[in-house]
């Protein structure tokens, strides 16, 4: 499932390529991917200008000049691609937005969705989300106080969207590695130095993920050479059996809090 770096990567690309353009036509091939009857959805989206794109946690919000907001969550298997009728992935598209000179394909929205909402409805959707870990307002003092109260594993705590927004399976393991902490450690048992290490690791790893374009393998547009490069730079995630990049001990995989987790049993403590 795409996490914060992947969705932020999409946002930055779309801001450059799509904002300011008008949606000339809309095609919906799977009604369950949207929240309105297809004719009504098309009627409210077609002809609208895309004025801004925002990201919150693992969501994107496409703001239209009508005041409508398209709320996207890709969930597991969701992808997006900017192309045209001659440059289109050989994948089933659930929704296609056609702009003046390109098309935005929403692919794999079997579990994901693209809902047309008001600004107030979007706010309601985000009420339970925790802080954005890359925002300036995300401070060590508040993080420290909240982590002291967590009795679950670091794995379960980091992926809890009510605690911190945007982190999932992939980056939680990378964060624990950067902090030199085992993902099965318990939040309220960490020392103050360990909590601080985890805080800084969150920002380091998420920014690193952004630098390398996240881990989604499919490019976002023809000639896209950045998206997905983090796969080549992962420290531990999906590296079972490989040597730890820090101490050369073999990386192992275990189920922690019912989630697959990768870590080094030597230099993570």
Image: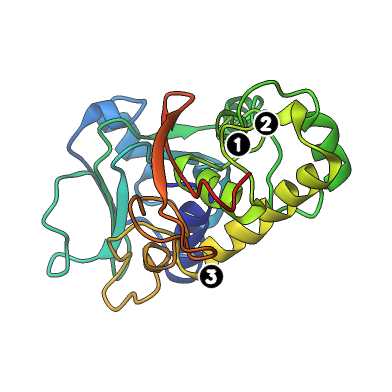
Among numbered discs 1 and 3, the one appearing first in the sequence:
1
Residue 196 percent location from the top left of the image: 80, 48
Q: Quadrant of the C terminus?
A: top right
Q: What element carries label 3?
A: helix
Q: Which residue is nearer to you in this view: 162 or 196?
A: 196
Q: Name the residue under label 3.
A: 211
Residue 92 position by quadrant: top left
The residue mark sitting in front, 1 or 3, is 1
Residue positioned most to the right:
141
Which residue is more in the foreground, 37 or 16? Answer: 16
- Using the image, determine if residue 16 lies above or below residue 163: below
Q: Is residue 242 visible?
A: yes
Residue 43 x %, y % = 33, 38
Q: Give the quarter of the figure containing the N terminus.
A: top left
x 57%, y 32%: residue: 184
Question: What is the CA distance from the residue labelled 1 to the residue labelled 3?
Answer: 21 Å
Label at residue 221: none
Residue wearing tag 2: 163
Q: What element carries label 1?
A: helix
User: Which residue shows up at 24% across the image and 28% down it?
Assistant: 31
Residue 189 point in image, percent of width and height: 76, 28
- Left or right of 131 in this view: 86: left
Q: In this view, does 29 lie to the left or right of 65?
A: left
Mark 3 Cα-neighbour bin, 10 Å: few <14, some 14–19, many ≥20: some
Q: Which residue carries the number 1 mark? A: 158
Q: Are marks 1 and 2 in contact (CB under 8 Å)?
A: yes
Q: Of the residues under marks 3 and 2, which one precedes in the sequence?
A: 2
Q: Residues within 10 Å of mark 2 (few under 14, many from 20)?
A: some
Q: Is residue 16 above or below residue 132?
A: below
């Amino acid at each position: 499932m795409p996490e914060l770096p992947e969705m932020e990567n999409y946002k930055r690309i779309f801001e450059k390529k799509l904002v300011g353009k008008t949606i000339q036509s809309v095609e919906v091939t799977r009604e369950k991917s949207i929240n309105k009857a297809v004719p009504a959805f098309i009627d409210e989206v077609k002809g609208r200008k895309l004025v801004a794109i925002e990201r919150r946690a693992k969501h994107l919000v496409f703001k239209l000049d009508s005041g409508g907001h398209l709320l996207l969550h890709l969930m597991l298997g969701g992808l997006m691609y900017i192309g045209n009728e001659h440059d289109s992935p050989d994948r089933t598209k659930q929704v296609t937005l056609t702009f003046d000179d390109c098309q935005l394909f929403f692919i794999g929205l079997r579990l994901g969705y693209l809902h047309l909402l008001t600004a107030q409805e979007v706010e309601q959707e985000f009420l339970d989300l925790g802080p954005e870990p890359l925002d300036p307002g995300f401070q060590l003092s508040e993080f420290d106080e909240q982590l002291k109260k967590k009795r679950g594993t670091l794995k379960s705590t980091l992926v809890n969207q009510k605690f911190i927004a945007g982190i999932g399976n992939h980056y939680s393991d990378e964060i624990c590695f950067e902090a030199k902490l085992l993902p099965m450690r318990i939040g309220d048992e960490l020392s103050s130095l360990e909590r601080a290490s985890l805080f800084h690791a969150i920002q380091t790893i998420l920014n690193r993920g952004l630098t390398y374009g996240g881990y989604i393998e499919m490019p976002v547009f023809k000639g896209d050479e950045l998206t997905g490069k983090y796969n080549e730079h992962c420290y531990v995630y999906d590296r079972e059996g490989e040597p730890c990049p820090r101490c050369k001990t073999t990386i192992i995989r275990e189920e922690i809090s019912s989630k697959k987790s990768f870590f080094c049993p030597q230099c993570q403590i």
